[in-house]
Image: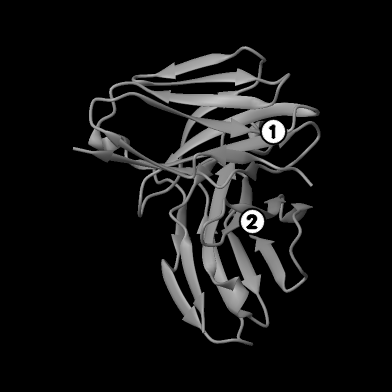
Amino acid sequence: ILNVEQSPQSLHVQEGDSTNFTCSFPSSNFYALHWYRWETAKSPEALFVMTLNGDEKKKGRISATLNTKEGYSYLYIKGSQPEDSATYLCAFIAQGAQKLVFGQGTRLTINP
Amino acid sequence: DAGVTQSPTHLIKTRGQQVTLRCSPKSGHDTVSWYQQALGQGPQFIFQYYEEEERQRGNFPDRFSGHQFPNYSSELNVNALLLGDSALYLCASSLYDRWKETQYFGPGTRLLVL
């Protein structure tokens, strides 16, 4: 059974502060890792698709890193804004698999 | 360009009933995957449809079945509903040979079983 864990489960951050959270996944049979942002009452939106060990991806103030050898990925948000409030999901794809295995998500709340 | 749409948005059923949820993929996409998200958990993979066939299935009982139509839209059927089937049901669409690159999700159908 594949286990994908995200920590923390929830996070409250002051506007303007930077923050980061973690996704842990199996280090064997890695194919890809997806990050999604999911705002309340909307559809999950793809942020990053990461495939190579050492990958770093950036989209505006949000960036992500990937370590496939030790099985973790970090998501960083610099200078948090209220619109960053959302649940951030990571999803692991194993070699040969036809499905995403999701973590339980990190719920981020930005306090003005 | 319409994204992924799902209907209905909310649904209330009683135990033992049957339910059908619908999904229209993003224009140009040929593959639909279904996920169940129970409260406090991440989405769990139910199954994936391509070319009107189920291609992969997660750990869900046979009460969960699906269908894909020639226009690529899809239905998820759940028979003999249990209280534990209460959840948000998401569908995601992609191109079959590029599904690992990204998935486009609909807003979900929230099912409550009483």
Dot 2 alpha-carbon crowd within 10 angstroms: few under 14, some 14 to 19, many 20 or more: few
Dot 1 alpha-carbon crowd within 10 angstroms: few under 14, some 14 to 19, many 20 or more: few
Q: Which residue is mark 1?
A: B97
Left or right of A77 on screen, residue B44: right
The part of the image, by quadrant, that contains residue B83 is bottom right
The local secondary structure at tag 2 comes to loop
> Residue A97: percent from the left, percent from the top?
77, 39
At x 47%, y 64%, the residue is: B109
At x 57%, y 56%, the residue is: B73
At x 64%, y 54%, the residue is: B44
Give A110 or B87, whichever is nearer the viewer: A110
Q: Is residue B101 visible?
A: no
Labels 1 and 2 within one chain? yes
At x 65%, y 21%, the residue is: A51
Task: Please say if the residues under marks 1 and 2 sit with CB atoms less than 8 Å apart.
Answer: no
Mark 2 residue type: Pro
Q: How many marks?
A: 2
Q: Which residue is mark 2?
A: B70
The local secondary structure at tag 1 comes to helix
> Residue A35: percent from the left, percent from the top?
52, 33
> Residue B94: percent from the left, percent from the top?
59, 40
Coloring applied to the structure:
one colour
Left or right of A21 on screen, residue B71: right
Give B58 or A2, whichever is nearer the viewer: A2
The part of the image, by quadrant, that contains residue A49 is top right
Tell me the distance, in whole angstroms, between the alpha carbons under discs 1 and 2.
18 Å
Give B64 or A8, whichever is nearer the viewer: A8
Q: Please tell me whether residue B4 is drawn above or below residue A54 in the rendered image.
A: below
Q: Please tell me whether residue B105 is drawn above or below residue B18 in the rendered image.
A: above
Q: Between tags 1 and 2, which lies in front?
A: 1
> Chain for mark 2?
B
> Residue A7: percent from the left, percent from the top?
53, 38
